[in-house]
Amino acid sequence: LWTSPKLEENTFFSYIGGEFTIVCTYESKFLFSKKYWCRGSSRYNCDILRDTDGVAKPKNKNRLSISDVQRYNIFVKVTNLQIEDSDVYWIGIEKMNADIMTSIKVTVTLGKSHIVLFTVSKPRLWPLTPLTDSPTCWGKPVTIHCGDAKGTNVFYAWYQNIHHKSFLLLNSSDLSLHCSMLTEDSDYYCSASNSISNAQSDGLSVKTLLPDDSSCIYVANIPGKNQSILHKM
């Protein structure tokens, strides 16, 4: 279960009136399992606020949504954040014996009026795992990091280009490439933004040579980096 954003170990900071979107990627075997968003300090004492079956009825349903509409991705969006929303939350997948759960700590502050903002510069991409390392040929995911953008309160997000349109993939500085998401050739880019400006990175091109949920072969190309074949087994 991979979750974003990852600012500090699944800790998210925002301000009154702000919003966030969390994307959770899961294994294909849980495609038809119920997913949910709950609140509570412990996974054993967690109040379900929303679920993909539509059973839970939250008080603020207009501010909270959960969807499972793309390939192995859960999307949770919360808008118009308030101070009382600060707490520990969980994304869960219903599973026999014990649900799969991962926590996200949300902290909402009074505001950002005291912050002096500077415009954002173009972000840079680089692999956290060198693309030429042999471990990438043995099933370990490859993570592409987006960073080095100058500015104040910079947030990073990854987008995927599909049929000449851009779609938000996740709110995070890191994009993890793994077989379950690589069903066809794809182009990605990272956006760095704050409340006054945004900038876009060079593109990340991924060509899928042999698609498969658990074993695939693909080529990742970052401008300025050597092209490398990554074989997932």
Image (cartoon, rainbow, N blue to C red):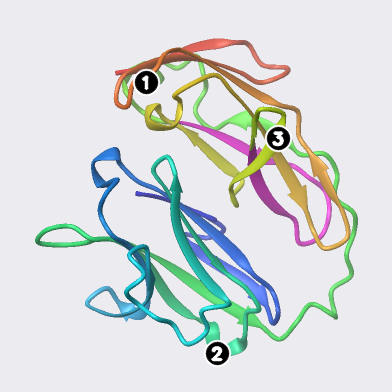
Q: Residues within 10 Å of mark 3 (few under 14, many from 20)?
A: few
**Depth check: 132 or 15 in front?**
15
Q: Kindly state the secondary structure of the residue where label 3 is placed.
A: strand
Q: Nearer the viewer, mark 3 or mark 2?
A: 3
Q: Position of residue 200 (x, y in %)?
A: 79, 38
Q: Amino acid at mark 1?
A: Pro
Query: Label 3 vs label 2: CA separation?
Result: 37 Å
Instruction: Report which quarter residue 53 is drawn in.
Output: bottom left
The residue under label 1 is 135
- Magenta highlight: main SS: strand
The residue under label 3 is 165
Which residue shows up at 90% across the image and 54% down it?
Answer: 119
**Quadrant (top left, top right, bottom left, bottom right) of the C terminus:** top left
**Depth check: 149 or 55 in front?**
55
Which residue shows up at 26% across the image and 47% down it?
Answer: 30
Q: Nearer the viewer, mark 2 or mark 1?
A: 2
Say which label, 3 or 1, has the lower sequence index. 1
* Residue 150 drawn in magenta: yes
Q: Amino acid at mark 2?
A: Glu
Say left or right for 149 vs 137.
right
Q: Kindly state the secondary structure of the residue where label 1 is placed.
A: helix
Say which label, 2 or 1, has the lower sequence index. 2
User: Farthest residue in the left direction?
Assistant: 97
Q: Kindly state the secondary structure of the residue where label 2 is placed.
A: helix
Say left or right for 81 vs 153.
left
Residue 231 visible somewhere in the drawing: no
Magenta residues span 142-159
The residue under label 2 is 84
Say left or right for 167 vs 213.
right
Q: Nearer the viewer, mark 3 or mark 1?
A: 3
Position of 169 relative to 204 (above/below): below
